[in-house]
């Protein structure tokens, strides 16, 4: 098979039918990338690699260029040390990289069928090397791919790539008929703590109402973005900051998939979640809270309870919530799904040192919840 690759700088240069033909069952479809591109993400420049056999599309890979923060998974006391170093050397832990995958979700590759997967990955890897050389990227990586891709990507280890574990994503299988039924399957301590939180909210006098919308008006968009930034500014770990335009573009470009869940107290917006859904799958992308209410009203757990019940009512079977904030997800019974990065430095001399640095900065070295769960064999 003689595989030819073509690289496009804009998703608009590719037809929706062609792109989606090799990504038939993913939420992050052609129009998701159109939303990303149209939102002017400051951190990323996107590239799209398409693989052809005799002018017939057999595979595709989304990629993006960025200054990758090697310290993104560092927490606790080590984060304070890293931040002190960055005061004097702001970009010391950043490295120019070309990554295959998505900035805010697990990586995916598009294939026409299983028979050509190996050829597609080899051709994508070669094309990435060419793009990296042209763009001055020092590192090439396949970012945050789950275990289904491991047999396909492990052969890259023979070509100088090294493999490190990323932050795991989190998934809940909705196989219960109500949130109350779900509570019965949790530990006694978790069950008691959650019920105590909900009783406290019930007795507070606050009436928290949820609304579901496919899109937002201008005023709501500004309010949602303020809540999003409040939450981002409280996170110890972070990879990307979405611009306000993305929250508008994703609902305009994907009206059948995008949903906003809004929580209000006395008509004041105090929380939101931006989610994508298709068939029986539900993906929780971004959230935000008003922190003058968030803790006293336990808005995070109100959000989870309401979204679980909404998924049940709408026959959703799988709820994916992504990375970070692992302790409440552990208590709520989410399944932790390991993700992996395959990376190499373009310099053979530097590559071994990058491998060591990647291992030192592994999030499993810093997150106590992940360390505990790994020790217990829970992921």
Image (cartoon, rainbow, N blue to C red):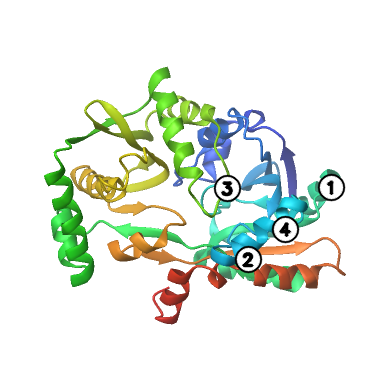
| Label 4 neighbour load within 10 Å: few <14, some 14-19, many 20+ | some
Q: Position of residue 33 (x, y in %)?
A: 56, 36
- Mark 1 and mark 4 residues within 8 Å of each other at the beta carbon: no
As measured in the structure, the alpha-carbon distance from the residue carrying label 2 to the one carrying label 1 is: 24 Å
| Label 3 neighbour load within 10 Å: few <14, some 14-19, many 20+ | many
Q: Position of residue 352 (x, y in %)?
A: 79, 73
Observer-nearest of 302 and 80: 80
Q: Earlier in the sequence, mark 1 or mark 3?
A: 3
Observer-nearest of 137 and 71: 71
As measured in the structure, the alpha-carbon distance from the residue carrying label 1 to the one carrying label 3 is: 20 Å
Q: Earlier in the sequence, mark 2 or mark 1?
A: 1
As measured in the structure, the alpha-carbon distance from the residue carrying label 1 to the one carrying label 4 is: 25 Å
Reading the image, the residue beneath label 3 is: 102
Q: Earlier in the sequence, mark 2 or mark 4?
A: 4
In this view, 306 is above or below 33 = below
Q: Position of residue 219 (x, y in %)?
A: 40, 19
Q: Which mark is residue 136?
A: 1
Reading the image, the residue beneath label 2 is: 153
Q: Earlier in the sequence, mark 3 or mark 4?
A: 4
As measured in the structure, the alpha-carbon distance from the residue carrying label 3 to the one carrying label 4 is: 28 Å
Which quarter of the figure has residue 19? top right
Q: Which mark is residue 85?
A: 4
- Mark 2 and mark 4 residues within 8 Å of each other at the beta carbon: no
Q: Earlier in the sequence, mark 1 or mark 4?
A: 4
């Amino acid at each position: 098979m003689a595989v030819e690759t073509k690289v496009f700088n804009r998703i608009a240069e590719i037809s929706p039918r062609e792109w989606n033909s090799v990504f038939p069952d993913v939420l992050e479809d052609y129009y998701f990338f159109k939303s990303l591109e149209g939102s002017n993400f400051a951190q990323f420049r996107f590239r799209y690699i398409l693989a052809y056999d005799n002018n017939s599309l057999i595979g595709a890979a989304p990629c993006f260029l960025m200054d990758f923060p090697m310290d993104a998974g560092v927490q606790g006391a080590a984060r304070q040390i890293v931040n002190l170093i960055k005061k004097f050397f702001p970009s010391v832990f950043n490295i120019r990289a070309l990554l295959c995958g998505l900035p805010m979700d697990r990586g995916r590759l598009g294939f026409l069928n299983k028979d050509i997967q190996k050829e597609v990955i080899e051709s994508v890897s070669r094309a990435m090397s060419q793009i990296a050389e042209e763009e001055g990227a020092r590192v090439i990586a396949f970012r945050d791919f789950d275990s289904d891709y491991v047999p396909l990507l492990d052969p890259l280890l023979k070509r100088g790539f090294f493999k490190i574990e990323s932050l795991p994503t989190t998934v809940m299988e909705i196989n219960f008929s109500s949130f109350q039924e779900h509570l019965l399957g949790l530990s006694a301590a978790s069950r008691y703590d959650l019920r105590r939180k909900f009783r406290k909210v019930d007795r507070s006098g606050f009436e928290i109402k949820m609304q579901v919308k496919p899109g937002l008006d201008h005023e709501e968009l500004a309010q949602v973005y303020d809540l999003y930034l409040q939450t981002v500014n409280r996170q110890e770990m972070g990879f990307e900051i979405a611009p306000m335009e993305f929250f508008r573009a994703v609902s305009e470009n994907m009206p059948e998939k995008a949903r906003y869940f809004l929580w209000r107290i006395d008509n004041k917006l105090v929380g939101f979640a931006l989610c994508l859904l298709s068939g029986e799958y539900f993906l929780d992308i971004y959230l935000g809270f008003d922190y003058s209410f968030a803790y006293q009203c336990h808005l995070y757990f109100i959000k989870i309870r309401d979204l679980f019940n909404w998924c049940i009512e709408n026959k959703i079977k799988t709820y994916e919530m992504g990375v970070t904030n692992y302790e409440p997800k552990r208590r709520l019974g989410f399944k932790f799904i390991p993700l992996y990065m395959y990376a190499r430095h373009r310099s053979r001399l530097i590559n071994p040192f990058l491998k060591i640095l990647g291992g030192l900065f592994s999030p499993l070295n810093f997150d106590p919840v992940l360390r505990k769960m790994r020790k217990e064999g829970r992921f």
